[in-house]
Image: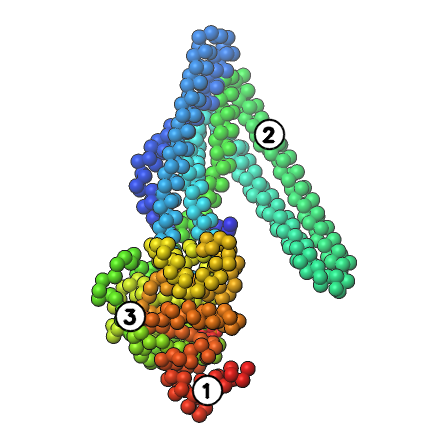
Amino acid sequence: MQEIPKKKITRKGLSKAFKLYEYIKPHRNEYFLGLFFLLGSSLSSLAFPKLMGDLVNTGTDRFVGTSVNQTAILLGVILLLQSIFSYFRVVLFVNVTEKSLAALRRATYNHLIKLPLRFFEQRRVGELNSRISADVTLLQETLTTTLAELVRQIIIIIGGTILLAVTSVKLTLFTLAILPPMMIVARFFGRFIRKFSKDVQAQVADSNTLVEETLQGIQSVKAFTNEYFEIEKYKTRTIEIANLGMKSGKYRGAFSSFIIFGLFGAISAVVWQGSQLMAEGELASGDLFSFVIYSVFVGGTIGGLATVFTNIQKFIGATEDLFQIFEEKEEAIIETTELKEPERLQGQIELKHLNFSYPSRPEETVLKDITVKIEPNKMIAVVGPSGAGKSTLASLLLMLHYPNKGELFFDDKDCLDFPLSVLRSQISLVPQDIFLFGGSIKENIAYGRPSASDEEILEAAQKANVMEFVNRFPEGLETIVGERGTQLSGGQRQRVAIARAVLKDPKILILDEATSSLDSESEKWVQDALENLMHGRTSIVIAHRLATVRNADNILVINQGKLEEQGTHAELMQKADGIYKRLSEMQFSS
Ligand SMILES: Nc1ncnc2c1ncn2[C@@H]1O[C@H](COP(=O)(O)OP(=O)(O)OP(=O)(O)O)[C@@H](O)[C@H]1O
Ligand SMILES: [Mg+2]
């Protein structure tokens, strides 16, 4: 999990933090009830030292009897009340927090999943995810603990100080002069020590990395007989760590001396002052007793205030961070159910002077002035050298990216005139690097259309020649594919992806062939599967092996982002020094 930075408390930051209230609002009654209990428990905790003092007073006045017992009973009642209050406070706050954060988590996920591809390409997804979860955890802590703590602290500091003053103004002034400064010094000292021990930890982690790397590269260490070199390196590290650790030990020792001398000294000084007042008859012994407890209460609370303040700063950082994601614009994704008749594609595609460059690399124009018309129900091949822009073209057709210039038409209608989800739901892409989810083969096929029946899944699997290898697995379609599908071969993964695409029954099918060449047996299975699939739809096959697209209705040759040639195999082979002819001859000779 990541460290969340502190943020200065600004008006803008606060207004972002208040957006969170939107999620708490539906449960605000519960929250306010929780606040009420918090108030109750904080106030009753203030009565505790007073009653303890009264108990001592009544005892020392040798009033042994009813009065002592009454005070004791009252004390018991207060404690009972306080425990009941704090039970309900915790339960209510946790309930509100859990419900609000569940809603916030859902809202974040719903938003995130609808963001355009561009958003994810510009970030490291793992980092994004861990940041969000760190943010949400921090919000959780703040809502359940930190805010309650802040309210409690304010009540205790103000109420406690008033009660101190009521007991003895003189003694209060004396205490305020020595105790809070001590607390503050203790706090900074403590922080310094924590920072120091963090440095030590970082050093230890470093040396662990050294060991790890050395052991991973043990072959090289041995091959170069560098064992003694490594031993020496590690020795230096251990000595450094020990020195640092010992230095930190000195600070820690000094800290505990300071606590003993400074803090307990200050308390003793208060008691000493108090005894003098007692001798002068200005203070009863029980009052002194409750006074000391109050001052420890108040002092401790002032000490803890800084931590709460830090947490609140972090909380503001976290909400700002989280709500920043909400400022990114979503794609217009809607739930696609049945398509209406005019929304159904005929399968004609037209590109007009299309230019494209990736947002992350705006200076490199990946597609240049592509103009082409693709007739319905035809098979189109796209060929060209690696890096020419073939996969990019596929992602544009699926509208994962948008052209910088030029237009894209489906059935003579601008792509932007269709609802995005309506278009995408009729196009299937079998991508170059196939991603399977960790479940079973069946689940992965069903992803093409989650509502499909078992029979339909089986039929898709048969058409895509998935059954050819699945029949050899004891668990059949229920076989688990492993994380990202790693337990299947490349050709098998490809066929599962094709089955998934068939199940969707798209009007336009785009197959981005994997570059890693399949053996001719697997290639035949994939090839077969494709032929089963192409009937009644426009299919676009991005091919690396030209032999596989020889009978395409039209072959587009893309080179460095430009559409250089197009035509059937026979037509292209006639061009004296055409790119296709050259590529074809090269592949044939090898
Ligand atoms: N997400 C991306 N962000 C930035 N640049 C990219 C991205 N994807 C591809 N490119 C760049 O766009 C150009 C075209 O890449 P593309 O993947 O379309 O090539 P390709 O024709 O499919 O190649 P191959 O035959 O190797 O699959 C390359 O220069 C590539 O580096
Ligand atoms: Mg590609």
Identify residue type, mark 1.
Lys
Alpha-carbon span between mark 3 and mark 2: 79 Å
Foreground: disc 3 or disc 1: 1
Tell me if residue 585 can be seen. Answer: yes
The residue tagged 2 is 265
Residue 281, x across and y down, in percent: 50, 15
Identify residue type, mark 2.
Gly
The colour scheme used here is rainbow
Label 1: element kind: helix
Foreground: disc 3 or disc 2: 3
Residue drawn where x is 40% and y is 86% of the image: 570
The residue tagged 3 is 415
Q: Quadrant of residue 410?
A: bottom left
The residue tagged 1 is 581
Residue drawn where x is 42% and y is 55% of the image: 443
Label 2: element kind: helix
